[in-house]
Amino acid sequence: MRHVPRVPRSNDKKQPAKKGGADPKGLIHGVVPPREILLEFIQDNPDRASKREIAKAFGLKGDTRIELKAALRALEDDGLLEKNRKSLMRPGALPPVTVLDITMRDSGGELIARPAEWPEEAGVAPAVLVRQSGGERSNTKAPVAGIGDRIVAKIFPNKERGGPAYTARVIKIIDKRKNAGLGVFRSMEDGKGRIMPIEKRGNEMDVDPEFVGGAKDGDLVEIEAASTGRFGLPRARVLSVVGSVATEKAISMIAIHSHGIPYIFPDSALREAEDAGPADMKNREDWRHLPLVTIDPADAKDHDDAVYAEPDASPDNPGGVIVVVAIADVSWYVRPQSALDREALKRGNSVYFPDRVVPMLPERISNELCSLKENVDRPALAVRMVFSKDGRKASHTFHRIMMRSAAKLAYQQAQAAIDGAPDDKTGPLLEPILKPLWEAYRILKAGRDRRQPLELDMPERKILLKPDGTVDRVIVPERLDAHKLIEEMMIQANVAAAETLEKKKQALVYRIHDAPSMAKQETLRQFLATLDMSLAHGNLRSNHFNQILSTVGGKPYEIMVNEMVLRSQSQAIYSPENIGHFGLNLLKYAHFTSPIRRYADLIVHRALVATLGLGVGGLTMEEEGQLDDIAAEISTFERRAMAAERETVDRLIAHHLAGRVGEEFDGRVNGVTKSGLFVSLPAYGADGFVPISTIGNDYFIYDEAHQSIAGERSGLGYRLGDQVRVKLVEAVPLAGALRFEITSEGRKMPTAIRSFHKSAKRGREPARKKPGTRPPRGRR
């Protein structure tokens, strides 16, 4: 039996063995342990799984640390380890600090939780046993959690056999969920009702006549569990009628409830917002003379960033430019540990649906006091950046100011003025404000081009609704230089914030983006090889991917390669530990520019206020000690928001197309699996599934490297990116699911793919449908 030494902690009396000495288990300190011992240590000690901690645990110094680094890299290459920020973990393992949802009790009465976010392709989320005490190293009892709570927890491997894979110690309860949910009301006889679940694992519930609450057949209703008898279905009472499921207006509420997104502000937060007044001039510079302007979408209701640029008059910087970015001073209004602060952290970020926004802060703060309105005094944090003529930043400084926006402009409006079609508003602004901004962007773009961030071409679609809330059409907004100007100026402001705080040795939350994992690199490498393209080995940079994207520009498989490169990338997260931002090709990056809608930005604002001595509202010592937990929470909430937004779009499109079952559409294959094809409808922004059992009369073989399926006998098949014609067979609006059948014939697969098929096992029968059955519906 293998053993891993118990590594002494700082308060242990026993000291580690000296180099060259053996511990009681036979391992020699100062020597890199075998692979299986390294893996076992990392699994058993997730909170000490960084290279530094592993080296300390096994007494490795000098050259042996280099050997350890090589051994760990080999384990990564073999897919046995993966990076989680600066730590290492087994693939599929939970990180040391995780957000959990407590879902049930086991037979012994212990609380059981599962990760709040878990990728569907990873299978069933692991169960976690929640311990209700602070443990032997804690002087205080942990918060008492219960079923339905969302918690931040410290994760430990469970060494007891037969139980959950992990145990957890509660750090913080972040969401007390009420015993409420959503369902579809169906009328029954005698005035009773029946609640039909909207989730795949939900249960039907009965509603007694006195608890119907005015709900009508087909209404989407908010419910809570009522007293339950010993027999029959569980009972519920209707709390409110959200709306008819026949209209799209109710659809975003499904995502809000199913993901547990807080959408009603508590009275305490609303009172604080209403009691807030204008900011004063204490510790502020008066910049109201500076003609800063906001440039936003035409339908924006809050404006949290303003910009200004002018040539640098310094003789030491010929041809240079000064760029000013001013951001709403949310930290002045939302103080640490206030009711507004607690609610903002619970939400993490604003969530954007086609028919509504669930804001992080009440409208009194986000749309009024912190919105940089035209010709209105507003408090802000500003960064003044000086760039040379080739786009290199020479210096920057931060200031707490009072500003007055000179104009509120839309992207299209500002772009039209630059393109020679100014209107009554932009005409007077063209020479003094807009042209200097575009000249500054030209200089910043030179620096961006030299930096070479990842340049993926994945246009975003936007759903436009009719006044009644139904889908009007799906568009791809034009990407203007005005968009790119604001984006690049915001990026530079974010970089400046990270650099300032790091230089001051001030703790902060970085926005980090790791390089693609070795496994994902290899998958992409194999795919590119089928197109006679190669991907370099070793330490990749964003420009390696840009070279590939440039090579396929204008070719039939351009979209396919863009999608595969996107899938190879890691997910950006928030962390107090900096590893840089791979996609932007930046060493230091922190979100600073959207504190109205992102809690991470509010933390960075507070850190700047504290470390630069800019007055009240700075980061507290208590907050500094919680940055690990805060980063884990807001990263989870960001993924929650993305999932809710995506599912809402799926449901809206499914609802929009529900009346067009039987019609044919032009589609594109955007996913290939063993069980079938995922097909998107570019004209609608919709995705649906084609079960493999419905494709022709051949036996189709899945080829992962080529991202294709091909008929064993015919050699005809489909590949990622192929244009296809499909018929809509089924639409399920509440699930956001579409099922298609392919009506266009597959194409002849390349020789390499057909050779692969010929080497496959023969004698298989084509897939046949059983009489009276229909093929399974795919899941997205």
Image: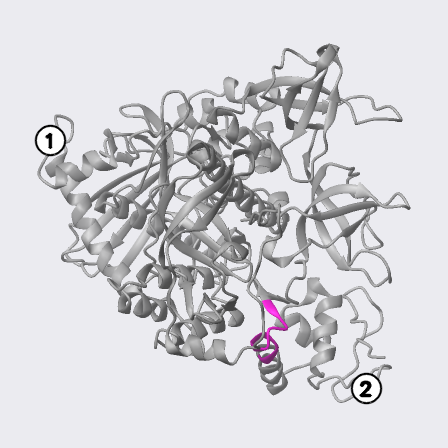
Q: Nearer the viewer, residue 389 or 125?
A: 125
Please state which amino acid type lies under the numbered disc 2: Ala
| Total number of numbered discs in the rendering | 2
Residue 80 falls within the magenta-colored stretch: yes
Q: Nearer the viewer, residue 699 or 127?
A: 699
Residue at 75 percent across and 52 percent down: it is 127
Give percent across and percent down for residue 639.
54, 46
Q: Quadrant of residue 17?
A: bottom right
Judge from the rendering whether residue 511 lies leftward or rightward of residue 238; answer left or right. Answer: left
Give percent across and percent down for residue 324.
28, 43
Residue 440 falls within the magenta-colored stretch: no
Q: Note whether 107 is above or below 167 in the view shown.
A: above
Q: Note whether 205 is above or below 584 in the view shown.
A: above
Q: Are marks 1 and 2 in contact (CB under 8 Å)?
A: no
Residue at 41 percent across and 78 percent down: it is 752
Q: Residues within 10 Å of mark 2 (few under 14, many from 20)?
A: some
Q: Nearer the viewer, residue 117 or 471?
A: 471
Residue at 34 percent across and 61 percent down: it is 453
Q: Note whether 56 is above or below 407 in the view shown.
A: below
Q: Secondary structure at mark 1?
A: loop
* Span colored in magenta: 74-82
Q: Nearer the viewer, residue 712 or 255?
A: 712
Q: Secondary structure at mark 2?
A: loop
Residue at 58 percent across and 42 percent down: it is 620
Q: Quadrant of residue 423?
A: top left
Disc 1: which residue? 427
The answer to whether one can see residue 596 in this image is: no
Disc 2: which residue? 22
Please state which amino acid type lies under the numbered disc 1: Gly
Give percent across and percent down for residue 668.
37, 53
Instruction: Tell which residue pokes out farthest to the bottom in this image.
Output: 20
The answer to whether one can see residue 684 in this image is: yes
